[in-house]
Amino acid sequence: MIKLQGLTRKFNGLVAVDGLTFEVGEGEIFGLLGPNGAGKTTTVRMLCCLIKPTGGKAFVGGYEVGKDALRVREIVGLLPEAPGLYGELSAYRNLEFYAKLYGVPKRRREENIERFLKMLGLWGRRDDPVATFSRGMQQKLAIVRAMVHEPKVLFLDEPTAALAPESAKTVRDFILELKQERRTIFLCTHNLHEAERLCDRVAITNSKLIAIGSPSELEQKFGPSRTEIRLERVSRKIVDAVRRLKHVKGVEVVGDKLMVEVEDPEAANPVIVEAVVKHGGRVRYVARAVHALEETYLRLVRESEA
Ligand SMILES: Nc1ncnc2c1ncn2[C@@H]1O[C@H](COP(=O)(O)OP(=O)(O)OP(=O)(O)O)[C@@H](O)[C@H]1O
Ligand SMILES: [Mg+2]
């Protein structure tokens, strides 16, 4: 559905996006991750035909970005970094304006506006001027705006950046619902926990592509594998015993937890638990350490900058 072939964008001397090549399939939720200034927004703006590439090519729904700009614009929706709504108009009028711009017929327009406003919990505020909306409400309204012509491909530039946890959850559920409708979602985010939960695949970029794959693939390939073992009580004897085990690369003690770095968790975990029990430890929980994508990300970005 989306195809990048050496996509590049220079601003004067600066290479903001450097030869990105990858594909995103129909119905996929794809995440673009990278540090500030990595070229995520620039990539999205090129794919939505708001700016032209200075090198390489890209296709959205089979149409070439830049060349078939009108066709591309018809099938994409965009939540930009800044919502950019008309403050003096009501939420409803804002949406109506955009839907008309896209030539959405009246009946369809009314249905879509109602459905999406309800899904994001803004229906009750539809007649209020947008200037009176909180930042998070404006962000949600901008997401509705991006969907009002029912695009096949939705680009979301940091959709939950301004949102409180319950609103972020509403937006995540909304995104998952769009996936059910086989829409393709391309999102830029700094929230790695969210990317891990939402995205089928992610690309980590820093102008250039650093890595691409499903979150768990990337974790397995590049990330440290850590097992978290919560004990009733941690003792020196237990820590030493675990540290001596083959396959164990390191042990860190955090409160009543052992954070054990291992190469192959499925082989190592049973042996670690045995050693803990043998040395008098009582195991309360064994789990894969969370935020693995975050650690993988930080490691990959650090290495790319070294
Ligand atoms: N219109 C422009 N003119 C000149 N430079 C630009 C322009 N737009 C972006 N850049 C530069 O391109 C680089 C990439 O910017 P971009 O906004 O794409 O990054 P980003 O990955 O979206 O970052 P963030 O996470 O902070 O949103 C930055 O160095 C930025 O200064
Ligand atoms: Mg950005």
Image: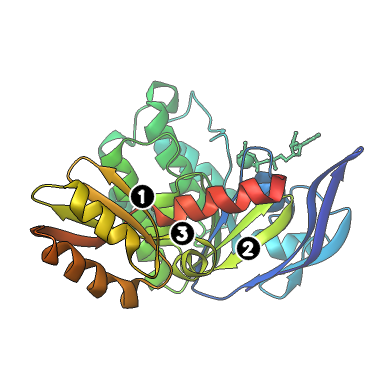
- The alpha-carbon separation of the residues under discs 2 and 3 comes to 15 Å
Of callouts 2 and 1, the N-terminal one: 1
Ligand 2 in which quarter? top right
Looking at the picture, how far across and down is residue 133, in whole percent? 38, 26
User: On the rendered structure, is 151 left or right of 12?
Assistant: left
Which amino acid is tagged 3? Pro
Q: Residue at x 92, y 38 (%)?
A: 13
Q: Is residue 235 visible?
A: yes
Q: Is mark 1 within 8 Å of ligand 2?
A: no
Instruction: Please say if 126 is above or below 89.
Output: below
Instruction: Please say if 281 is above or below 16.
Output: below
Report the colour scheme. Answer: rainbow
- The alpha-carbon separation of the residues under discs 2 and 1 comes to 26 Å
Of callouts 1 and 3, the N-terminal one: 1
Other residues around mark 1 within 10 Å, as few (<14) / some (14–19) / many (≥20): many
Which residue matches tag 3? 224
Of callouts 2 and 3, the N-terminal one: 2
Which residue matches tag 2? 211
Helix, strand or loop for disc 3: loop
Which residue matches tag 1? 171
Helix, strand or loop for disc 2: strand
- The alpha-carbon separation of the residues under discs 1 and 3 comes to 30 Å
